[in-house]
């Protein structure tokens, strides 16, 4: 397998939204069209909250991505905001899209509550991190995380955080040296079925 790392490119969108749908099981929440629109919205949201991107490309195909943010220097370009607003509008045009967007909004409000509980003045954020399930266990996630740590060190960022939940491999972050600082349970009603999840805030302190 030929593996390389480079910044995110617009041509990565199809592969990255596919990874988002697989990792967060969007197709279990709604039909394919709404799942794709939700993945587009999630990706565009992440792109508005980053100052650093790195994509893992295996044999020419993006298989993982990580995005970080320097909170002190972050300024979102208008073009990225426009794409995010357009994605939200596309999602809101259908009833199913509006339903899943409410879940998206609720998750975001939970994350903001977790952050508000923290007393640390975080200088950075791990804004987005995902690896294709087909490429788990190959060291790609670890390599992407090391790239992000190097970026944070280059920016003199000692403390950064991330949000995650029980739908993801959150144990990875503990193995990577991050510490769980906050958590909150929440039960969603999805297709007349209750689904209980836990949401977490982890952080990383670089003492070097």
Image (tube, grey):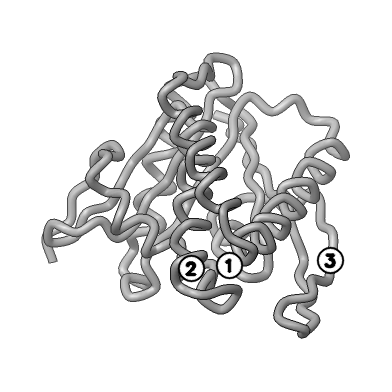
Q: Secondary structure at mark 2?
A: helix
Quarter holding the N terminus is: bottom left
CA–CA distance in space, label 1 to label 2:
7 Å
Ranked by sequence position, the earlier of labels 1 and 2 is 2
Going by the image, does 36 lie left or right of 172?
left
Other residues around mark 2 within 10 Å, as few (<14) / some (14–19) / many (≥20): some
Residue at the outermost bottom position: 193
Image: 46 above or below 98: above
Q: Secondary structure at mark 3?
A: strand
Q: Which residue is mark 2?
A: 23
CA–CA distance in space, label 2 to label 3:
19 Å
Other residues around mark 3 within 10 Å, as few (<14) / some (14–19) / many (≥20): few
Q: Where residue 168 is drawn, which disc sits there? A: 1
Q: Where residue 186 is drawn, which disc sits there? A: 3
Q: Quadrant of residue 15?
A: bottom left
* Tags 1 and 2 touching, CB below 8 Å: yes
- Residue 20 is situated, as x and y percent measured from the top left of the image, at 45, 61
Looking at the picture, tell me which residue is in the foreground, 31 or 186: 31
Q: Nearer the viewer, mark 1 or mark 2?
A: 2
Ranked by sequence position, the earlier of labels 2 and 3 is 2
């Amino acid at each position: 397998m030929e593996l390389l790392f480079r910044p995110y490119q617009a041509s990565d969108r199809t592969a990255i939204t596919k990874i988002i749908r697989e990792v967060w099981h969007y197709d279990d929440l709604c039909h394919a069209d709404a799942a794709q629109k939700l993945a587009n919205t999630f990706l565009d949201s992440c792109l508005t909250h980053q100052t650093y991107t790195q994509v893992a490309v295996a044999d020419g195909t993006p298989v993982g991505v990580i995005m970080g943010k320097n909170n002190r220097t972050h300024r979102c370009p208008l073009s990225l905001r426009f794409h995010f607003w357009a994605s939200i509008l596309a999602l809101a045009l259908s009833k199913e899209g509006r339903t899943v967007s409410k879940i998206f909004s609720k998750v975001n409000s939970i994350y903001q509550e977790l952050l508000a509980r923290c007393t640390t003045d975080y200088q950075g954020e791990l804004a987005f991190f995902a690896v294709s399930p087909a490429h788990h266990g190959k060291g790609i996630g670890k390599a992407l995380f090391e790239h992000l740590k190097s970026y944070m060190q280059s920016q003199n960022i000692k403390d950064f955080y991330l949000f995650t939940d029980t739908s993801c491999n959150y144990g990875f972050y503990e193995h990577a040296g991050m510490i769980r600082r906050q958590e909150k349970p929440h039960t969603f009603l999805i297709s007349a079925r209750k689904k209980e999840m836990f949401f977490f805030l982890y952080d990383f302190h670089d003492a070097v």
